[in-house]
């Protein structure tokens, strides 16, 4: 035992000698933690760089890679639409839009739906005014099968008599029964038909009886005319390599590149004040809609007018919504939007209020518009609009669907990502003078205005007449069908 203790004692002695006996005590410094007495520095948000589409297959396929998303979006664009295909009667275009994506010769409608369900995919057709789209949304792992079904629908669709009868019955029910009882359908029908005359390329009226005269062969002939124009391009968005994206190229066999769209002629502007009243009692609620002309897509003042829209009623904290909802308590909400199209531009305001508050709401809207025309946006409103636009931009690649919508709009207008980025950045440079100047020609009291008021004529007519307005009273059916 003694032999074991001796070495241990020697080690202890050495340790004691090596250790300084009179060393200064170690100073312990406490971590004060973050300084919460002053707020952190505010850094301005940064706009993310979005990639340009990569052209494949001689430019006919535009590819955008969005990493990490599960779905792939494929959109085929044919550069003709309702204005070209259905200038006088919109019914064949409505039928084509309803029936085109339902089935093919290899997969009739009763087989196409379960085939798409098995893939968790869908195919949709959209006939716009100057372009037609056939789109596929599909998980990445099922892309090859989805493209195969899309190719069938593109080239060999089936327009069956049964499906046409079903579409005709649905359309007639909506036009003749459902829509005339719906406050929104009536108000927007009157707004669109009151703004665009029947002779306008955008003013074609729906015709319920035309559905009865339509045969499957008519829809098939329209489809063949669409393909015969010979141009088409594809947009592919998803987490795909260029080689994987190029797999959609066979869809474009027999077609040439669509190229940038030609600039259409501008629509003539309405003149003066027009007020359309629609007699539709709706539990005391009244729909108020206002439309004015606004900058078109190519107008350099489009950005400043968008700032005006944001400040007036395009955001929750906008002036008109704050007054009508928060201060007056007359509505659940008011909204507005700027429709900047190549051939025309519009600004639309929508709000529903109790019929007792109709004149008050109209007066407040006119007052706030006049104030804006005199003052323009405040620096705070410009900053909020820019940040809102920046947030939207930076969320662009959260899903393939978001990205596909953005890039589809850019390509459809013949623009580049740089053009869209410059327009987004320009919002930060808006001022009271620039926004006032952009808004004044369109929103001034003497500028062309279309008001649509939908409610109980017996109550509203005396109220509106007290303003001295030349109100044209029509039925809900006339509003939906455009008989005005």
Image (cartoon, rainbow, N blue to C red):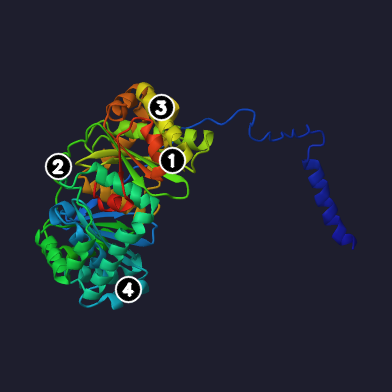
Q: CA distance from mark 3 to mark 1?
A: 15 Å
Disc nearest the viewer among 2 and 3: 3
Occupied quadrant, residue 290: top left
Q: Residue at x 17, y 67 (%)?
A: 213
Residue at far right of view: 2
Q: Earlier in the sequence, mark 2 or mark 3?
A: 2
Give the residue at mark 2.
263
Give the mark toward the camera: 1 or 2.
Answer: 1
On the question of residue 196 being in view, the answer is: yes
| Label 2 CA crowd tier, 10 Å (few <14, some 14–19, many 20+) | few
How far apart are labels 1 and 2 at the CA level?
A: 33 Å
Front-most of 354 and 107? 354
Q: Tags 3 and 1 in contact by the CB under 8 Å rule?
A: no
Mark 2 and mark 4 lie on one chain; the one further toward the N terminus is 4
Element carrying mark 4: helix
Q: Position of residue 185 (x, y in %)?
A: 35, 52
Determine which residue is flagged by label 3.
367
- Report the residue marked by disc 1: 334
* In the image, residue 156 above or below residue 70: below
Q: Residue at x 22, y 48 (%)?
A: 412
Residue, x 33% and y 58% (percent of image)?
238
Disc 4 marks which residue? 113
Q: Is residue 144 visible?
A: no
- Between 263 and 410, the one nearer to me in the picture: 263
Cα separation, mark 2 vs mark 4, equals 38 Å
- How far apart marks 4 and 3 lie (CA) works out to 53 Å
Labels 1 and 2 touching (C-beta < 8 A): no
């Amino acid at each position: 035992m003694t032999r074991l203790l001796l070495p241990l004692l020697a080690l202890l002695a050495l340790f004691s000698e090596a250790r300084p006996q009179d060393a200064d005590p170690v100073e312990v410094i406490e971590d004060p933690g973050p300084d919460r007495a002053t707020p952190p520095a505010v850094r301005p948000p940064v706009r993310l760089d979005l990639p340009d589409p990569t052209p494949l297959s001689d430019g006919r396929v535009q590819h955008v890679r969005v990493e990490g998303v599960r779905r792939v979006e494929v959109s085929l664009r044919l550069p003709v639409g309702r204005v070209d295909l259905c200038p006088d009667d919109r019914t064949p275009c409505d039928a084509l839009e309803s029936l085109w994506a339902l089935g093919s010769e290899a997969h009739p409608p009763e087989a196409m739906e379960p085939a798409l369900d098995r893939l968790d995919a869908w195919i949709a057709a959209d006939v716009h005014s100057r372009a037609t789209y056939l789109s596929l949304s599909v998980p990445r792992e099922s892309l090859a099968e989805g493209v195969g079904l899309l190719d069938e629908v593109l080239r060999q669709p089936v327009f069956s008599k049964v499906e046409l009868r079903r579409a005709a019955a649905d359309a007639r029910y909506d036009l003749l029964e459902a829509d005339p009882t719906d406050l929104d359908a009536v108000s927007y029908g009157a707004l669109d038909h009151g703004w665009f005359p029947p002779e306008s390329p955008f003013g074609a009226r729906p015709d319920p009886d035309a559905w009865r005269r339509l045969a499957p062969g008519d829809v098939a002939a329209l489809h063949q005319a669409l393909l015969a124009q010979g141009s088409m391009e594809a947009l592919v968005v998803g987490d795909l390599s260029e080689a994987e994206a190029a797999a959609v190229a066979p869809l474009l066999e027999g077609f040439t590149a669509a190229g940038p769209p030609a600039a259409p002629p501008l629509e003539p502007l309405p003149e003066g004040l027009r007020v359309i009243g629609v007699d539709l009692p709706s539990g005391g609620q009244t729909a108020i809609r206002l439309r004015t002309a606004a900058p078109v897509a190519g107008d350099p003042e489009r950005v400043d007018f968008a700032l005006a829209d944001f400040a007036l009623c395009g955001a929750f904290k906008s002036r008109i919504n704050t007054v009508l909802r928060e201060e007056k308590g007359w509505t659940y909400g008011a909204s507005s939007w700027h429709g900047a199209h190549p051939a025309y531009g519009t600004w639309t305001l929508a709000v529903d209020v109790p019929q007792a508050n109709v004149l008050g709401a109209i007066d407040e809207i006119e007052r706030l518009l006049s104030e804006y025309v005199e003052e323009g946006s405040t620096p705070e409103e410009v900053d909020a609009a820019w940040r809102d636009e920046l947030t939207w931009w930076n969320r662009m690649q959260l899903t393939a669907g978001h990205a596909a919508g953005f890039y589809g709009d850019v390509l459809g207008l013949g623009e580049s990502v740089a053009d869209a980025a410059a327009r987004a950045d320009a919002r930060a440079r808006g001022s009271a003078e620039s926004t006032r100047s952009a808004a004044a020609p369109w929103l001034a009291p003497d500028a062309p205005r279309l008001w649509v008021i939908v409610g109980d004529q017996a109550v509203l007519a005396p109220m509106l007449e007290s303003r001295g307005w030349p109100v044209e009273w029509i039925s809900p059916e006339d509003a939906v069908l455009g008989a005005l």
